[in-house]
Amino acid sequence: MTTYTNPFTGQTIEPSAISYESLSLIADTTLDWPINGNNTTPASSIADVTTTSYSGLSLLLPPATQVSVGQSILIRNVGSLAFTVKNNAGGTIVSAASGVAYFIYLTDNSTVAGSWATVTFGAGTSAANAATLAGYGLTAIGATLNQTYQIVNYYTNATLPVTVQAQFVVWGGGAGTITLPSASTAGANWFCMIRNNGSGILTLTPVGTDTIDGNANQQLQLTESLVLVSSGSGWNTFGYGRSNSFAYTQLSLVVTGGTTALTSAQGANTIQEYSGVLTSNQIVVVPSTVQLYTITNNTTGAFSFTVKTSAVSAATITVPQGTSLVVICDGTNVYNAGSGASSSITTLTLGNGSLASPSLKFSGDLNSGMYLVGSSQVGFVIANAQAGYYNAAGLTMAGTGTFIGGITGGSF
């Protein structure tokens, strides 16, 4: 390898250099080292190169054998078109894009072409590659990073992989379970969003000693959602959206027998009324979620009417025809809310009432009953007319009557 040294100091020297040159390319151009009077197209330390009218041009460096290794040149493309920087033998060193600067230095001068290395200094203003920077929860739109919620759907029991970080997990099956990854494996600050968009209760279950908000699991009713965050040793939630779709709305459905599975929208109705002529036993399958229903069986035909969930061997309830029952679904079983044999209350306070509307009356006759006539006086109403009353003096009856079994302890 040829070197050029100072005969007095032994240090490597280079030819005298022009520190700056502005070049305009209109054709392929070969640079010269500024030695022996070569100054037509000198290779200066810094060169601003412009080409605006001609594409595909080349800028060739001088012979590598005429300088020492380490010789360098900074070339900046200040034009609108790209050009190619080549070695003296025509081999490509770098394609110079518009607005970008390249630091080019010699690493081997044993041949005319030499070996050149490059460092890209970049444009006048730096621009990051958004697509390269985009990680979990981010997407590149042009040159910018933007937040994104990638949706991933599950329909059967599954264990979440750590790769669902920052994604929106949507459950679309019936009653099921999603097992969470280990919080220590996911790491602190790992998070995802989960929504139950299915037809049954979704149970979120951690593994090992992990808990969710200190609990062994977390249930999501229909349409409920939350954000799940790892602490590195357990799970915490926020943004828990409680279901408000199960409101006091009424479903009126005509059935004729067989099995009718309610949709989530139908099951959202707390008050349900069924009618129609049954030609076989009727089974109504409610969603597998916690809910309170008032069910009225107005069907006809000598067949049974049963309410249940899709769970096998779970409790069911049979509603007789012409009957309304308040039933409870715990997500698996269906019970009669009023199944007790008897009940009692300590006190009962009624309004005063009137002859037109007695305080105590009956579903079979709303015009007969009892009401408060005045202070310390309770009246009897028959067909909105006073039939008698009690007060401190005793019982007073209107009109005539027949007493069954006789009278004892007094007289009329």
Image (cartoon, rainbow, N blue to C red):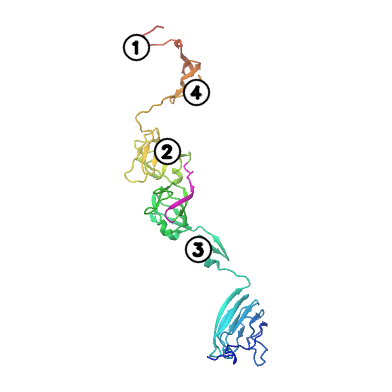
Amino acid type of the residue tagged 2 in the rendering: Tyr
Q: Nearer the viewer, mark 4 or mark 1?
A: 4
Q: Amino acid at mark 3?
A: Gly
Compared with 149, 270 (above or below) is: above
Residue 202 in percent (x, y) is at 41, 49
Which label lies toward us, 4 or 2?
4
Residue with the mark numbered 1: 405
Q: For residue 241: magenta?
A: yes
| Residue numbers of the magenta segment | 232-246
Whether residues under marks 4 and 1 lie with C-beta atoms below 8 angstroms apart, the answer is: no
Q: Residues within 10 Å of mark 2 (few under 14, many from 20)?
A: many
138 w.r.t. 18: above or below: above
Q: CA distance from mark 3 to mark 1?
A: 92 Å
Label 2, on which residue? 293
Which residue is identified by label 3? 135
Residue 351 — which label?
4
Q: Is residue 55 above or below residue 286?
A: below
Q: Which residue corresponds to the image point at 52% horizontal and 61% vertical from the top-left? A: 138
Q: Residue furthest top?
A: 411
Q: Mark 3 vs mark 1: which is more N-terminal?
A: 3
For the point 61% across and 80% down, which residue is it?
74
Image-quadrant location for residue 58: bottom right
Q: Earlier in the sequence, mark 4 or mark 3?
A: 3
- The front one of 111 and 164 is 111
| SS state under label 4 | loop
Along the line of sight, the residue nearer the viewer: 288 or 216: 216
Q: Amino acid at mark 1?
A: Gly
- In this image, 351 relative to 44: left or right? left
Q: Is residue 200 magenta?
A: no
